[in-house]
Amino acid sequence: MKKVGIVMGSDSDLPIVRKAIDTLAAFDIPYEVHVYSAHRTPVEARDFAVSARENGFGAIIAAAGMAAHLAGAIAANTTLPVIGIPCKSSNLDGMDALLSTVQMPSGIPVATVAINGAVNAALLCAQMFAIEDKELAAKLDAKRKSDAEGVLAKDAAVAAEFNK
């Protein structure tokens, strides 16, 4: 199985990124995690992206806040799928990161999840990998079923309390 590259612009993004790491681990999807800044370490970020395919990656998750140019910088240097996680910051509650991540020019796509949406970034990688992996697809189906059962159990508890 290909692995997922996870890149964050700062280690302050780790609490958010950890949710993607945990989600990938739950599906037994291999990953590798790095801190590269689009602005402070542009050469290293570029080198990672340029060599990602030959290094066994199948997708890259890039998390950054504020200007959030990391996902775009990574996507500019690879044709692997790149999923951007805009991270909430104290300045504009993550809206700056969201807009920076989602507004990519034609020809350099970045899939963008919600602000701090690390779980969905990991699940999107899992779904892409599951196109060719029936076992992983079954795990995703089971998760969806389990999630639905959890919601229905909460519905039953709320209904029992309030619907008399």
Image (spheres, rainbow, N blue to C red):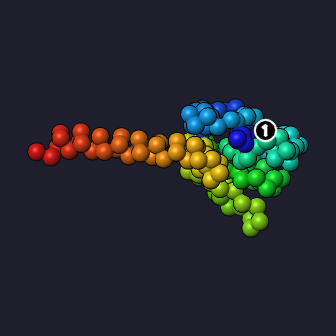
Q: Position of residue 152 (x, y in %)?
A: 31, 45
Q: Which residue lies furthest to the left in this view?
A: 164
Image quarter where the N terminus lies is top right
**Does the rendering let one see residue 52?**
yes
**Does the rendering let one see residue 90?**
no
The residue at 65%/51% (across/down) is: 132
Q: Quadrant of residue 157?
A: top left
Q: Residue furthest front?
A: 134
Q: Where is residue 159 in the image (x, y as percent from the top left)?
A: 20, 44
Q: Where is residue 11 in the image (x, y as percent from the top left)?
A: 70, 32
Please tell me how crowded label 1 is: few (under 14), some (14-19), or many (20+) other residues with Cα within 10 Å.
many
Q: Position of residue 67 (x, y in %)?
A: 71, 49
In this rendering, position of residue 98 left or right of residue 142: right
The residue at 61%/34% (across/down) is: 28
The residue at 71%/53% (across/down) is: 81
Name the residue that disc number 1 marks.
36
In this rendering, position of residue 77 left or right of residue 61: right
Q: Quadrant of residue 21?
A: top right
Front position in the image: 112 or 160? 160
Front position in the image: 139 or 38? 139
Question: What secondary structure is marked by label 1?
Answer: loop
Q: What residue type is labelled 1?
A: Tyr
